[in-house]
Image (cartoon, rainbow, N blue to C red):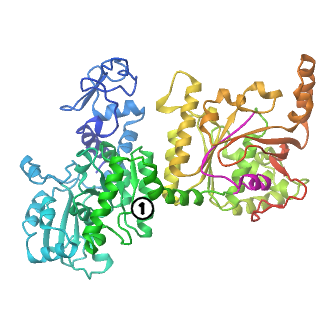
Amino acid sequence: MTRKEALELIRSEINARPLTDFIMLEKSKGGMYVCPICGSGKGSHKTGALKVYMDTNRVICFANDECFTSKGEDTLGALRRIWNCTEEEAMRRTGYDIEDFIKKPMRTMEPRKAQEASQAPQVQLEQEEAPDFTSYFKTMAANITSSGAMEYLSYRHISLETAQRFMLGYDMRFTEGTGGKSWRAIVIPTSQESYVARNTDTNADKGNRYRKVGKAHLFNARALKRDAGRALFITEGEINALSIIECGHDACALGSTSNVEKFTAQLKAGRRPLIVALDNDEAGQRAATKLADVLKRAEINFTIVNVYGDHNDANEALITDKEAFTAALDAAAMTTTAAPDSISSYIKRLMPGEIHSFNEASHIKTGFDVLDSITGGLYPGLYALGAISSLGKTTWAHQLADQVAASGKHVLYFSLEQSKLELASKSLSRWMAQRDYNTALDSVAIRRGVTSKGLAAAISEYTASVGNRLSIIEGDFSYTADKISEYVNRYIDQNGVRPVVVLDYLQILQAGDQRSAQRRDDIDINVTELKRLSRAKNIPVIVISSVNRANYLTPVDFESFKESGGIEFTSDVVLGLQLDCLDEDLFKEDGNKKIIQKRQRVKEAKGADPREIRLVCLKNRYGSIDWHTNYRYYTKYDLFEEVTPDGFVPTHEPTPFDN
């Protein structure tokens, strides 16, 4: 298929669905919505502004012609304007993989008759470039009462009534993807264009137990849009979903957690409390964590519950003791729907897992020994680091990133101002100075191409120490919090690790789709989004921020951050770098004559080599705030050297950065 053909097919599929299938809209009066672009429709009368015409899927804002064209936009056009992105980006955000479509050959699809659709009410119907299996499903469904099918259903404790409700079939000569072998298989439709075939031979080897045919779909996806308020269980396998349904509850099956990102739009369309009940084994728990990340990112309410006890999955629990399994499902559903935010339910069901997750991501050593001895290291949460211009906040954070990577942890450093060349040369200069201050090259010399034996050794040793664990992502002055979140999510999915994230720095970060009239409000939005990222992914996020120029002659405090948005209220930890001299008695005195003296003292302190710097704690949700640490800052070599108190003994494992 050509790219043009793929785009046209995706365009037609998206435009065949209403806007509300892809994004949540705030309801107003008269069947209308609040416009997500101009915000109209929120007035005291809530008369509404946005109209979605379900018969034509056109979208019009009656309050502002600039939001959409006067004749309205189709669904894809509306998404482009709302998300302020290209057509292809909008396609990707709705879950369509353009490259995947291009790889597929064009196929002729059988006509879809309304009568056929009505005979299979539980089958998810979606237009996709894939064959139409409706006739096959009807033929196989006629075989479901045969002895081989009934024997398998009995073994699985699935009733004929449940099987017929979901149009299960029986293929006595199934050969799709079997390597020429013939199976007797139960056919489970997952959409009009896809199904799962399960081998009825219970002794078949692992590679011949089931086959998925067609593009993956949610099993029983229609359940997402019905019975609002009633709990809906989410399983991985279709047989497990059927097992829960057999006990009188409702369930959907993902089919594969590798496809969970594609189902976000469908999950958003639902209004039901979701209970994640994947398998009890290690793989199932990893899958549950991945699913939870996606649901949190999509702001979909859910809970994770073990309803299987000591059993591995729903079908095993059903076969062993249907009465006990039904009681467990009843209890989970009652807790979820009656009081979804019950603290007792949280403590019993979710708190142990979250404690484990928190501790798993905690105690990340910074490589600054005194700091680590006071704080215990980095924890999941939002850290804000502030200082006046040119005091070394980027250098301190970048050195911390080097040290964290050298200790074995992954770090994503988003540099929105400085280039990779600048930061890499600073790392090498710092590395050389830690080993021999007298022969080290400064970063400018390295960037000019000056070479030495020490530099060659530094390159070899430094790259070996940080490996592939430190990534420097250059900004282009158009980076948004959403773009950072997308990068982090993709990195976690592809590498299976949770990195420390550093953003340098906050004031350069753009506001994206939520841009406001006031820059301060934009910063507040970004701080909130970065806090959401730290919570959703359970990772430390360190944000570098500038502070008021008025703090040039005063110690850093919360007033220093007043122009930086809601850092004081949203951050978990707030740190500030300042000249150590600001704690001297001179800076506690008032008067114009003292200002001249203070300026002279600050000038002397900034010109010193090394420069005496103090890190102060203003807020700390993980412990005491009554502490500070001191550093000697060798500006020429971009090196912070910690001042250790007398008798101090470091407790961390040595890293290649240690002298």
Task: Please report the residue visible at 72 percent of the width from the left and 29 percent of the height from the top.
Answer: 560
Magenta stretch holds residue 370: yes
Total numbered badges shown on the rendered structure: 1
The crowd level at tag 1 (other Cα within 10 Å; few <14, some 14-19, many 20+) is some
Q: Could you tell me which quadrant the C terminus lies in?
A: bottom right
| Coordinates of residue 76 in the picture (x, y in percent) | 31, 35
Q: Position of residue 64 (x, y in %)?
A: 35, 18
Is residue 153 at all visible to an observer of this figure?
yes
Q: Is residue 195 above or below residue 145?
A: above
Q: Please tell me which residue is depicted at 66% across the width and 52% down the height of the picture.
A: 378
Q: Position of residue 72 (x, y in %)?
A: 27, 24
Please tell me whether residue 234 belongs to the stretch shown in magenta. Answer: no
- Vertical position of residue 36 compared to residue 380: above or below: above
Does residue 192 appear to the left or right of 353 in the view shown? left
Q: Which residue is mark 1?
A: 287
Q: Is residue 215 above or below residue 156?
A: above
Task: Give the residue drawn at x 90%, y 34%.
Answer: 584
Q: Does dot 1 land on a helix, a strand or a loop?
A: helix
Magenta stretch bounds? 365-387
Q: Residue furthest front?
A: 344
Residue 453, by quadrant, is: bottom right
Classify residue 643 as left or right of residue 544.
Answer: right
Amino acid carrying mark 1 in the image:
Ala
